[in-house]
Each structure stands twice: as structure tokens, then as C-alpha cells.
Amino acid sequence: MQRIDRVLVSAFASTLLFAQLAGPANAAGHFSDPDWKPLPKASGRGQTAVRSPIDAVPGRSSVQGHTGFASAAPAASAATGLAGAPNGSSRAGLPVSPFAWSRTYWNTALPADAPIDPNSASFISFLKSDNTLDYVKISGTTSDGKWGTPVYRAGKRDKAYVIVNSCSSYQPPEFGSVRIPGGAQPDPTSDASMVVDDRTAGLIYSFWQASYDSGSDTWSACGGTVYYRSSNGIVGSLPESNEPRNYGHRGLHPFTYAVRYDEVMSGAIDHVLRIMVNTTQCHHVFPMSGDECGSTDQDDPPEGTRIRIKLSVDLHGLGLSPQALVVATALQTYGAVIGDQSGASVELKVENMVAEGKGWLWDGLLSSGALSAIPLDDFEIIQLGYGS
């Protein structure tokens, strides 16, 4: 794939560029994915400077309705303005973005006038009755880090492994050679999940039921997820994607899986998050390509539902910790996509720093109840399919 840095292009030239980045279609066809079912855990220093709520977020859109920012040729629509230059370098003091383009579905703030789904109140009411807690629980903050997600950065010096497929689920061909840092460990739970970001290869991988055998020096996993950094981050089976090789987790980009430590300490999370709920409807909407089918109740939000904290909620007046305020600001600015069943409560995960060997860094920063001052009634559902 051709690599292009800092380029200003016309709408027509940008359309051609995206076509180049998309590359050839994968003949294997990516339409199935293993079920992922996370769960909870938690506990309760440091000052974090919280940056920019909605109007101060770079790249904030003022477009109404369906913005179309996931389009394979975003420059074709002047209204969306999403032909941004490739995001090849990190902003000063901030984590490096996992996206090559400055504006995608995943890292574009919701406009203040984003359309609210007509069934928003019913969806929220269902979530209140179907989940064990009336707020978003944060998983992975306990001393053992369990039910968080380890996130590793791989480089040229790391060994490349052929990942053994431990189940019958489809595994992308990119898993035939994956660089994994020495000493990496998955989350020590039944999910055994982890994310590997290989910026040199331009790929972001996610593993489920990952396992390392030290005797044979081999890695295995059930199926697998891979997304290309040069893409718009939409799963390749959807027409909105500009990269047919993007595959896995029913459409969720790996960098939505967990709140990363570097993001929180930088003072801002500049992308959509993933949340899990007790059950999800047997239906899915953009940006998801599948669902776990946990309920036939029409008031149960389907997977792909985008939810945010209402703009009328004054987050600074809730007594949140600086770190909790960073997370809450992201949930109000970018929102979250419902993308998994938790089997208990509405939850989001944090990075498992313990599994990464860095220690219990969340101690005194975030706990499972860090967002308990924000009840589910303070959330609203964006129009289903928004962004398609």
C-alpha cells in the first residue's frame, strides 16, 4: 500500500486515495465472528487535566442527521468535511491515534444536534430494568486487573508468531504472522483477551481466548480480529468500509474495547468507546455487522446503538474524580457503541495494566463505581444507524 503523509487534496483526489488504501478484497469473505462475553470487577491519586468538552474538540462536526463519515469516499460529500489529511503523527503530549485519517466514525465527536432516536426513552427504560446497576460500571480497575484488556505495542524487534486457531471460528490470514512483545499476557479470565497494535505493520489485532505456550514458544487464540490503520476503521463486510480486510468482533474497532491509561492521563479520550449491557436485542445496526441475540424485546437496544450522556448534564458539578471526568467527557462528547453482552450490568473496560506488568496503576484513579453519580436516565440514544 502506498504511504502518503500530510497531503491536501481535492474531493476527487481524496476519493481516489481512499480507493487506493482500500486494497484488494479478501477472497475468504469476512462475515462471521466468535461470541465475546465480558464481565465485571473493580476498586478506588493523581491529577489529570481534563480537556475539551464538545465544542472544543478538534474536528467536531456540526452536520445534522446521518453524517456519512464512514463512507469509503468521504470527500464526495462536501457537507461532511471528512476528507481530513492522514493522521500520521501524534499531537503533542497526546496518545498516538489508531486511525490514519483525522476524521472517521470512531474519532469524530457527535454534533450537539445529533438526532435522538424516537425510542430513546424506551431504550433507556429497558436498560434500567434489565441491568443490575443504574450507572455505567468500570471493569478492570481492581488490584488484579481482571476483566480489563491488556493493550500492547509491537515493533520490528518483536518476534512474529503464527497464531494457532484454537476453535472453529474464522481467523484472518493476517494472523499468519503477528508480532507480539515478549512477556505479553492476556487478561487472566475466561475471555483471555488482549489487543496488539503494530504501527510498523499498520495493523491492530485483537485476541480472544489467547494463550501462550512457553514450552513450544507458540501463541493460540480463538478466531481473531484485525483492522488496518490506513482505513476508516469500519468492518470490511459493510459498504461504508474502505478496507475489505478489516475483520472481527462484529464490527467493533479494537481501540474502542478499553479506556487506555495514557488517554486518561493525557486528559482526553478522543474516540468512541464500547460499552456492554446485560442483554442485546436480536438485531444490529451500523457500525455493527452482527449481534449476540440476547433478547427479542423491541425496547432492548440492538448492538451498534450509540449512546451518550445528555448535553444538559453538567459533568463538572457531579463531584467526579479528575480521571472519571475524562471518561465521562468522552461519553458525552463521542458517546459509546453498545457492542457486547455483559450478563449483568452496563459496563466499560479499562486497560489491564497489571497483565501488562506495569502494576495496579488504576489504584486511586478509577474504581468500578467512578461513574455512579451519572444515572442511566442521564443518557440518551442517538438515532439508530447514525453515521451510515
Image (tube, rainbow, N blue to C red):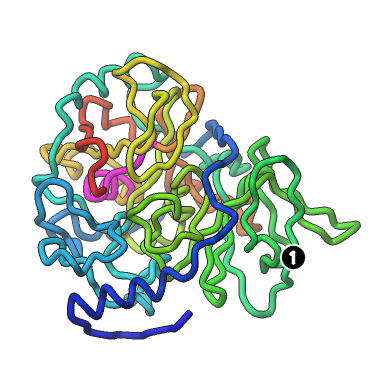
Between 154 and 161, the one lying in front of the other is 161
Which residue position holds label 1? 161
Q: Position of residue 32 (x, y in %)?
A: 55, 41
Query: Residue at 39% of width from left, 24% of height from top?
Result: 281
- Left or right of 160, for residue 146: left
Residue lying at the far right of the rendered structure: 215
Part of the protein shown in magenta: 327-338
The residue at 40%/29% (across/down) is 346
Q: Is residue 329 magenta?
A: yes
Magenta region includes residue 165: no
Q: Quadrant of residue 282?
A: top left
Q: Residue at x 29, y 69 (%)?
A: 102
- Where is 174 relative to 274, above or below? below
Percent position of residue 56, x then y: 15, 61
Residue 363 at x, y = what percent? 50, 47
Residue 101 visible: yes
